[in-house]
Image: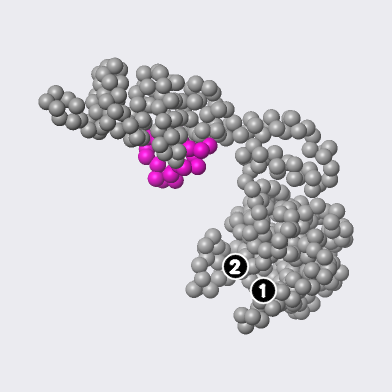
Amino acid sequence: MVAGGQSTSPEQLLADAAAAMRRRDLAGALGSLAQAEQIAPFDPHVKMQKAMIHRMSGALPAALAALDEALALDPYNFLALLSKGAVVEKVSGERLAARVYENALKLAPDDDKLMPSLKAPVARAREVVEKTRAALESYLRDSVGPLDQVGGELAMNRLDEAIGVYAGRRKIYNHEPLLLHYPRLPAIPFYPRELFPWLPELEAATPMVVEELTAVLAAQMDAFEPYIAFRKDLPVNQWGELNHSKRWSSLFLWKDGVRQDAVCASCPGTAALLDRLPMAHQPGFAPTAMFSALEANTRIPAHTGSTNTRLLCHLPLILPGPARFRVGNETREWKMGQSWIFDDTIEHEAWNDADQLRVILIFDVWNPFLEPAERERIGAMMAARNAFYGS
């Protein structure tokens, strides 16, 4: 109440408090806030104003208490969390502040929707979080010890990724198949080589495959077709730049389980090699084997494949310069004479950073964790689905 018995609104009292602070009248500001709290004890704006005044006056513990009162009323108050992180940083340091900042950043608007006055505080929050996560990851690695002493390739890569995930610096990637998710198969980005004893034979054949590919490129480059070719009535999503573009093109030796005889005839050694390898034979679906060409300075955007029942093998054939490939959290550089096998239902992307064409051989193989009888029934199941829909 004010003189004459008229009630004063919380908004007016908050304005009075702000005016008192401009006059450096801390007692007057706190007095107005006390009145506002009596009238509106559950108004988060009053708590936020109280926190700001305490913070401006240097009373950081009181500011922190007021922010906690605001968060008790609304735990998803982005401004209260961001402010609390800044106060905790001053009172207790970056490491404790990082945990508050992490929660604030989960609620932060997109950068283009941030008020200009909040851009610097949000940038500081990100800086503290990343710095703390990096320090935590380093501390975890020092505590765990050398990764090469934990076992084979699979165990070493698992532990390496787990440390990054536990420190908050790596994302958790799971299977995201476009067609069939087969349960209880491990989500392994790059599979251990020991599961595929035929890889040395493939790698030893690199010079022969390169020789045949070189002849094909000279005589049949026009036969390479855009790998991405959506109909006009379908959304292209991330593929707008590459849709119907020869910046990423392919020449198929096998396509959806059908041998491309003309191409195989022009590459007889490569075709015979593929016949000897344990490709995933599944009528109507697999194998698919192709020369995959990526133009200079071109990126294949992040995407996922059709099913985790089969894996993809890459063999580099033409590498004019730097070329990278990421599956999940792991990024590798292609090297001549070295192949790898990966699960393409885990998000992956590729870059040709060189100034000339890059070409690799790609073909699919069964997931080694499947039993032979499972493979047969998976094929039957997928064929039955097509038959059900008449496709």
Picture quadrant where residue 256 is located: bottom right
Q: Residue at x 78, y 43 (%)?
A: 156
User: Is residue 345 placed above or below 60 in the rendered structure?
Assistant: below
Residue 250 in sight in this render? yes
- Check disc 1: other Cα within 10 Å, few if <14, some if 14-19, many if 20+: some
Seen from the viewer's position, the closer of residues 6 and 71 is: 6
Q: Amino acid at mark 1?
A: Ala
Instruction: Please tell me whether mark 1 sits on a helix, a strand or a loop.
Output: helix
133 in magenta: no
Seen from the viewer's position, the closer of residues 223 and 391 is: 391
Residue 125 on image: x %, y %: 50, 33
Q: Residue furthest left?
A: 4
Residue 386 on image: x %, y %: 65, 78
- Disc assigned to residue 333: none
Residue 262 on image: x %, y %: 75, 79
Residue 128 on image: x %, y %: 54, 31
Instruction: Please tell me whether mark 2 sits on a helix, a strand or a loop.
Output: loop
Region rendered in magenta? 102-122
Q: Which residue is mark 1?
A: 223
Picture quadrant where residue 64 is located: top left
Nearer the viewer's eye, disc 1 or disc 2? Answer: 2
Q: Residue at x 39, y 45 (%)?
A: 113
Give the quarter of the figure containing the C terminus. bottom right
Left or right, 252 with reference to 337? left
Residue 127 in sight in this render? no
Q: Which residue is mark 2?
A: 228
112 in magenta: yes
